[in-house]
Structure formats: C-alpha cells, structure tokens
Amino acid sequence: MIAHITGTLQRTSPTAVVIDVQGVGYNVLIPLSTFETLGASGSSVTLLTHLHVREDAMMLFGFATDAERIMFRLLLSISGIGPKIALGILSGIQSADLQRYIVQGNAAALTAIPGVGRKTAERLVLELRDKIGKNEISATGVDRQAGTSDIRNEALSAMISLGFSRATGESAIRSALAELSGKQYTIQELLKLALRSASRKDV
C-alpha cells in the first residue's frame, strides 16, 4: 500500500496531477478540493494516497488531507459507488458539508451533489451516518488565476473526466458563465457552478 507521495509537481488539472519522484512521474487522480490547495508547477508537494487495484488497472488517488482520504474510502465502501463517482462527490461539495449532511440525515441536501440521486443519498445516510465522527472537516482553497479560455477548457476537461458527456459539460459551463454574468472567476468557481448546473439537468 502506498501511504503518501512526495515529489515535484510537474503538471496539474482539476482532476489529476503528475508528481515527479526522483525521475519517475506518477499520475495521481485528485478531487477538486485537493486541486485548490496545490502550488504552482515546479513546487514540492506531498499527497496522502489510496491505491485502487482492479483486474485491468491500478489507479493512484491523492488527497491534501487525511479527512478527504477517509471520506473517499468511506464512499467506496458503499455498493454502487466506484472511485470516479467518489471523486465526483468530493469535487462537488466540501468534505465538512458532506459529513454534516450525512450525520444530520439530510438526504435532500445530498441530492444537490452531482451524480447523487435520491437512492444514493439515502444509502449515504444509512450506511455512513454511524461511521462518521462529528468532527468538522475543513478544506482551504487557493485561487489560481489563468486566462478565460484556459479556464473554460480546463473546466470542460475536468467535467468529462468526472463522467459527464462533452455536450452536458459544455451546456453546464455555458449556464455557469451566464450565472457569473461577466464577473472575474477562477477555475474552482466556474467548475463548481457547472457541476451544480449539470446536476440539475442530469440527476
């Protein structure tokens, strides 16, 4: 089991990073909450990891905090939730809010998360309510500035990586841009609004 990885950040996107460790590049899949904490390319980074092994692939997932990794593993323990859906859930809501809604039994609030329908929300509450402690889970964000076109393309790429079709992603991003109404925005702000928009249409 790989517990953590420390190296030089080579490439970043909202859903994955490449970390160079003594000349070996590791592709690590991450949630948006972890992406928000990363520094610039070339900086040193340490991520806590979870190695997911399938018959046809091995995937390494990285998290900025142990709380995120714990939530990811708890989500994987639920029937019907795989790593891609678990990452999507952690990308669509702060860990603290996810924990709070589950502990409160607020299935209705959970259905606002992209990819979470009524039955999945009810399973989250039923299966995780007693497992989750009542300590708040926090995640701090770091604004990352980029060109408008780069941000839109990166947001679309992230949505496709999270399992949305290109058409759904493009439509959701257009809706998010309309909601932002000409304001300056970061990749995080655009992607979160787009995920909400896609959730309203698809879930």
Image: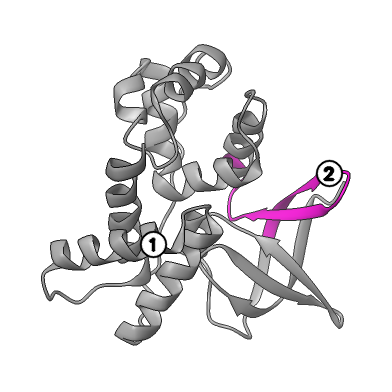
Q: Is residue 43 above or below residue 17?
A: below
**Quick one: SS at disc 1?**
helix
From this view, report whether residue 56 is shown above or below residue 186: above
Comparing 13 with 79, the one in front is 79
Q: Give the quarter of the image for residue 112.
A: top left
* Main secondary structure along the magenta-highlighted residues: strand
Residue situated in front as seen by the camera: 118 or 180: 118
Three-letter amino acid code at the position of disc 1: Ala
Q: Residue 147 at what x, y percent from top left?
A: 34, 87
User: Residue, x 40% and y 68% (percent of image)?
Assistant: 142
Q: Nearer the viewer, mark 1 or mark 2?
A: 1
Quadrant (top left/top right/bottom left/bottom right) for the C terminus: top left
Q: Residue at x 67, y 26 (%)?
A: 77
Q: Which mark is residue 145?
A: none
Q: Nearer the viewer, residue 201 or 187?
A: 201
195 sits left or right of 65 in the view: left
Circle number at residue 167: 1
Residue 4, magenta (yes or no): no
- Residues shaded magenta: 47-67
Residue 106 horizontal side relative to residue 89, left or right: left
Tag 2 or tag 1, which sits nearer the N-term? 2
Numbered disc 2: secondary structure: loop
Residue drawn at the location 56% of the way across and 15% of the way down: 127
Mark 2 = which residue?
54
Q: In the image, is residue 50 part of the stretch drawn in magenta?
A: yes
- Counting from the top left corner in percent of width and height, residue 16 is at 61, 65
Amino acid on which the number 2 mark rests in the picture? Arg
